[in-house]
Amino acid sequence: MTLNEFKVIFWWEWIHRFLGRLIGISFIIPLIYFTFKLGFKKLKMLYFIFFLICFQGFIGWYMVSSGLVDRVDVSHYRLALHLIIAFIILSLILWSFLQTKDLNLPTNNINNFFPICFLFLVFCQIIIGAFVSGMDAGQIYNSWPLMGSSYFPDDNKIINIFKLSAFSDPSLVQFMHRNLAYLILIF
């Protein structure tokens, strides 16, 4: 990596961290104001969201630290954790917002099974996508719908998909990511 390439990464990281701090400050200042105005009990969920925002910063540091010793890239597990916490924060903010709105929904409740299953599958796809990104697994098989010359990756055995080590194998992670996308589409 040249010095100029490092400068590009440095500025992306600097802006990312600055934005994270700005989000934290932009969240806590109104939260303190509304705590005095409305009380703590009504804002418990927002304090939990603020805790997750702070925790997100710690996880970001924890993720980056995995690429500072013995490796030049970050752990795909830590990358996925950092990403999924961001999606949890966004989901909780949306949930809190929707609770404050009067949506005039019908009084009969729908079965929550299918929406919850769909959201679970989407969150799993996001996690597996972070694994693909963290391991650069998308660079292995660039053909679609086949992976090489077959549906299953040429460089692996089907039995390996049932092992825990499959989450650290780039070709199997790409296979899982593709097939989970098919499952979500069918669902």
Image: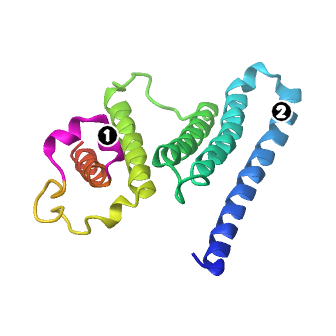
83 left or right, relative to 68:
left
- The residue drawn where x is 24% and y is 52% is 175
158 left or right, relative to 171:
left
* CA distance separating discs 2 and 1: 48 Å
Q: In the image, which disc is placed on residue 165?
A: 1
Does residue 164 show up magenta in the picture? yes
Determine whether the residue tagged by mark 1 lies in a helix, strand or loop.
helix
Determine whether the residue tagged by mark 2 lies in a helix, strand or loop.
helix
The image shows residue 165 at horizontal and vertical percentages of 31, 40
The image shows residue 73 at horizontal and vertical percentages of 52, 58
| Residue 14 quadrant | bottom right
Instruction: Write the start and end of the magenta stretch as one range.
Output: 156-169
The image shows residue 182 at horizontal and vertical percentages of 23, 50
Kind of residue sitting beneath label 2? Phe
Please name the residue that numbered disc 2 is placed on: 34
| Residue 7 quadrant | bottom right
Direction left: furthest residue: 150
Binning the other alpha carbons within 10 Å of mark 2 as few (below 14), some (14 to 19) or many (20 upward) gives some
Q: Which one is nearer the viewer's eye here, 145 or 122?
A: 145
Marked residue nearer the N-terminal end (2 or 1): 2
154 left or right, relative to 71:
left
